[in-house]
Image (cartoon, rainbow, N blue to C red):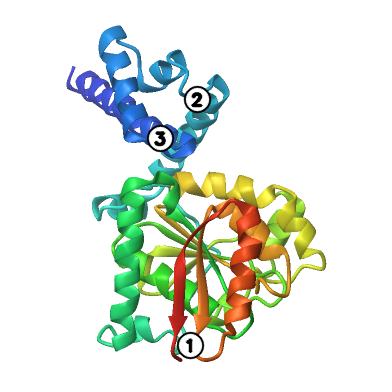
Amino acid sequence: MNANLEDTFQAADARLDYAKELREALIAHCRLNSEAIERISDSMRGSGMSFDAAAVHIGLVTEREAEEASAWTRATLASREASVVEQALRRQGSNRQLSLTHAGVGRPSPELAFMHNAQHPYGERIRALRTELLLLKETDRQAGCFAVLSPCSGEGRSHLAAELAIAFSQLNRRTLLVDADLRNPCQHLLFGIESQWGLAQALAFGQPSQLFGVQGLPFLSLIPAMPPAPNPSELLSAGGLKQLIRRWRFTYDFIIVDTPPVSRYPDALNIAATCHNVMLVGRASITPYRDMRAALRRLSSTQSRVLGAVMGNF
């Protein structure tokens, strides 16, 4: 009898977990704002329907979107059951609770001063930028994905992307750092990673890319770009990256995407259009004003939102 009761309680818990996960998946997948969520909740109270059924009923979610979210949720829960480590991470406060399998673990290089010295003056500026982006995400669910762009090479874009990802992960928020510079990638160098199946191969063959963990940062995952691709513009404009980011939104609170220089390649514009949110990076007294203006002019065609410019002094 006790065994039967325990099975009943476990089944009830499983249903509650599924309902909760499905609700969060739909909110992220369909970018439902607080007003939409309230409308769905009102419909649930009046009809007794589940969150997904009510969302479809009032037309805020399509049946296909509900089915996609349901399939993703079931896969998530099945994966989580097999991971004891994931259960520990859940208790630490991450909102995106997929079980992640890492192909390896990298280590932040000494160049990432913010990681190795919390009292570094530069770290205070990174944390201030992180706070601004956190406030933005509170009012816009789409704001969890950021493309970091610079007009030219050597302006600190990749360093800023890496340090922002580190800063978000230190809040126990699931963070993904993506190296989308398929021409001259460097995130694998900043984290000491070797890979034969990076973002380029994932886009070319329609297969998942390898995830790497980072030593000392359990909430940070990295997707390198290596090895470089012979046709990066085609890969980034074919729609594959958009699909990947759509999936990653189910898993991560924040996605930081490193890009190639805007002035040299069209790749960054494709990435900006996909991420919607852009931060421009330049170097004080180095980046020409005309290049920054040209980058802003080119970004206007992507309909992405330029959040601001970060000027470094290093």
Q: Which mark lies nearer to you, 3 or 2? A: 3
Q: Residue at x 24, y 51 (%)?
A: 91
Q: Give the quadrant of the N terminus.
A: top left
How far across and how far down the image is residue 227, in percent? 72, 71
Looking at the picture, does residue 66 appear above or below residue 81?
A: above
Q: Amino acid at mark 3?
A: Ile
Q: Residue at x 72, y 49 (%)?
A: 206
Where is mark 1, residue-wise? 284
Q: Amino acid at mark 1?
A: Ala
How far apart, in angstroms, are the residues tagged by discs 3 and 2?
11 Å
SS of the residue at dot 2? Answer: helix
SS of the residue at dot 3? Answer: helix
Where is mark 2, residue-wise? 66
Between 65 and 216, the residue placed more toward the observer is 65
SS of the residue at dot 1? Answer: loop
How far across and how far down the image is residue 73, in percent? 45, 34
Q: Amino acid at mark 2?
A: Ala
Looking at the picture, does residue 293 appear above or below residue 173?
A: below
How far across and how far down the image is residue 291, in percent? 63, 78
Between 236 and 192, the residue placed more toward the observer is 236
Q: Residue at x 35, y 74 (%)?
A: 216
Q: Which mark lies nearer to you, 2 or 1? A: 1
Q: Of callouts 3 and 1, which one flags the residue occurring earlier in the amino acid sequence?
A: 3
Where is mark 3, residue-wise? 27
Judge left or right: residue 119 versus residue 23: left
How far across and how far down the image is residue 240, in percent? 69, 49
Q: Residues within 10 Å of mark 1 (few under 14, many from 20)?
A: some
Whether residue 11 is visible here, answered yes or no, is no
Whether residue 240 is visible here, answered yes or no, is yes
